Image (spheres, coloured by chain):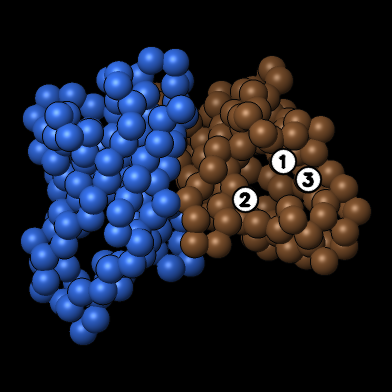
Amino acid sequence: AQSVSQHNHHVILSEAASLELGCNYSYGGTVNLFWYVQYPGQHLQLLLKYFSGDPLVKGIKGFEAEFIKSKFSFNLRKPSVQWSDTAEYFCAVNPLTGGGNKLTFGTGTQLKVEL
Amino acid sequence: GAVVSQHPSRVICKSGTSVKIECRSLDFQATTMFWYRQFPKQSLMLMATSNEGSKATYEQGVEKDKFLINHASLTLSTLTVTSAHPEDSSFYICSAVLAASSYNEQFFGPGTRLTVL
């Protein structure tokens, strides 16, 4: 079965610092890739997604992610974080073969941005 | 945007009772909804796929007689936790698939916190 790994469980940054959250998946076929964010007390929201084409995708709020097929990775980045980016971030994978619309989530990364 | 609601947002019940959680797509129709379970500091685990007009598809290890799913209409799916026990205490989240989107995007509800005493 496919799995999704997020190696950073807790990240603490100061405002204006750069962010990179790792995401690796184990699935040999073609996949759709997603990053979701969950702000405190709110529901999951889609940050960005990758289907095909340019492996560098841009999402909302200045986030971007790069798909590196050879590394089975889809790392999330932001050049300069803000206090309002404090949230939990989840990477998710949807295998295109036999997966239907199913998403497999990583364990999440709790990001805290300090003023 | 597409909005998904869940009711109730939190529920406390006694061991042995059954609890029903509703998931509604407020401004779109969803032929497919998903039910997830999230333990503290852990990821969302898919429990089942709810399809309108047909039986739900459960993931391996999820007891279908324990977690009853009914997708009664294109805007409503319910999850009933039968004979709940303390180990069923968790955060239950649903999502609804917007079929009209380019890739069948899932929109998530706010979740329901279940505590079984």
Chain B painted colour:
brown
Q: Which numbered tag is attached to residue B81?
A: 3
**Which residue is found at the position 33% from the left and 26% from the top?**
A27
* Residue A26 place in picture, x, y as percent: 33, 32
Q: Which numbered tag is attached to residue B79?
A: 1
Q: Are marks 2 and 3 on the same chain?
A: yes
* A90 relative to A81 in the view: left or right: right
- Which chain is home to disc 3? B
Q: Nearer the viewer, residue A92 or B4?
A: A92
Label pair 1/3, CB-CB below 8 angstroms: yes
Label pair 2/3, CB-CB below 8 angstroms: no
Chain A painted colour:
blue
Residue annotated with mark 2: B92
**Quadrant location of the C terminus of chain B?**
bottom right
Q: Secondary structure at mark 1?
A: strand
Question: Which amino acid is tagged 3?
Answer: Val
Q: Earlier in the sequence, mark 1 or mark 2?
A: 1
- Which chain is home to disc 1? B
| Mark 1 closeness class: few <14, some 14–19, many ≥20 residues within 10 Å | many
Q: Nearer the viewer, residue A59 or A12?
A: A12
- Which chain is home to disc 2? B
What is the CA distance from the residue labelled 2 to the residue labelled 3? 11 Å
Q: Is residue B89 above or below residue A17?
A: above
Question: Which amino acid is tagged 2?
Answer: Tyr
